[in-house]
Image (cartoon, rainbow, N blue to C red):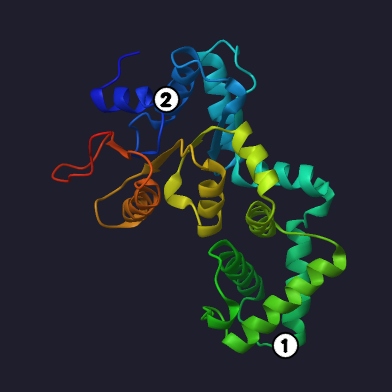
Amino acid sequence: MAFNEAQKRAIRHFKGPAMVLAGPGSGKTTVITHRVKALIEERGVDPGSILVITFTKAAAAEMKERFGALTEHRYGRVGFGTFHAVFFQILKLAYRYQASDIIREEERTALMRELVDREGMELEDEAEFIASVLGEIGSVKGEMLSLEHYYAKNCSEEIFKRLYEGYERGLRAKGRIDFDDMLVMCYELFTQRKDILGAWQTKYQYILIDEFQDINKVQYEVVKLLAGERKNVFIVGETTSPSTGSAARSRRSCWALSGTFRARSAFCWISITAPRGTSWSRPCG
């Protein structure tokens, strides 16, 4: 398969952090799978020390299948998964969590509906309100925000605080955690148990993340911890325009990542398909 120069640079990147800005249809999945192959076959990296993370089960399954087809399924020990799947595996080994410990979506909705009913609120669309509040709760957890300083979007701060706290009490009473709890708990585990963090840093020495523009703060913080001193993080963010949408988020994430890692290692910034007139592509090293 023929690659352009930017794709080749991304595939050949070895150690240290790298950010790839990739437009739609630019072959970013192909770049990721070929880079994993190059790490193993050209750099001698142990397949079991490579972790590829994306945001949906379908995307993770597709990535794994395409990598398997590319390598004739020779390297089955490469890890592919979503953030939630990877973090849950970590918690499962640390705390012996099982899938049954994760609250189901219908249970979350029922719990929140009960809390909303207690408030006696008159709502035009209760289902939409419940979904929105649950989304806000997820944002508070995922962005590591202080509830005391959070400005609610769908109701007053007082009501949101009661709904949030009631939801948390309901989870604990049921002995359940939600998907956002998994992220927060993984961060807390890594910050409190350096021995466990060290074991996972040793296991996953090369981390590749697709759709990086969608990452939230707690995911970002866990990735930084997991990367450790090696800082072998290869992130791919999708671009749409140089100033709006996912491109703006990608660039903010890129600057944050480069600022985090610049002191100890070179930062590689590659643009596969930047819009004409932009200057996002920068040399490695």
| Quadrant the C terminus occupies | top left
Write the residue at 25% across / 22% down: 4
Mark 2 vs mark 1, foreground winner is 2
| Quadrant the N terminus occupies | top left
Residue nearest the observer in this picture, 73 or 58: 73
Q: Is residue 259 left or right of residue 78?
A: left
Residue kind at label 1, given as amino acid type: Glu
Vertical placement of 213 versus 170: above or below? above
Rendered image quadrant of residue 265: top left
Secondary element at image label 2:
helix
Furthest-left residue in this view: 277
Secondary element at image label 1:
helix
Q: Position of residue 16 (x, y in %)?
A: 40, 35
Q: Which label belongs to residue 252?
A: none
Question: Which residue does the numbered mark 2 point to in the structure image?
Answer: 30
Question: Which residue does the numbered mark 1 point to in the structure image?
Answer: 119
Residue nearest the observer in this picture, 188 or 51: 188
The answer to whether the residue labelled 2 contacts the one labelled 1, judged by CB atoms less than 8 Å apart, is no
Write the residue at 34% across / 46% down: 262
Write the residue at 33% across / 31% down: 26
Residue 23 makes an appearance in the image: no
Residue kind at label 2, given as amino acid type: Thr
Q: Position of residue 243 (x, y in %)?
A: 25, 56
Q: Is residue 140 left or right of residue 17?
A: right
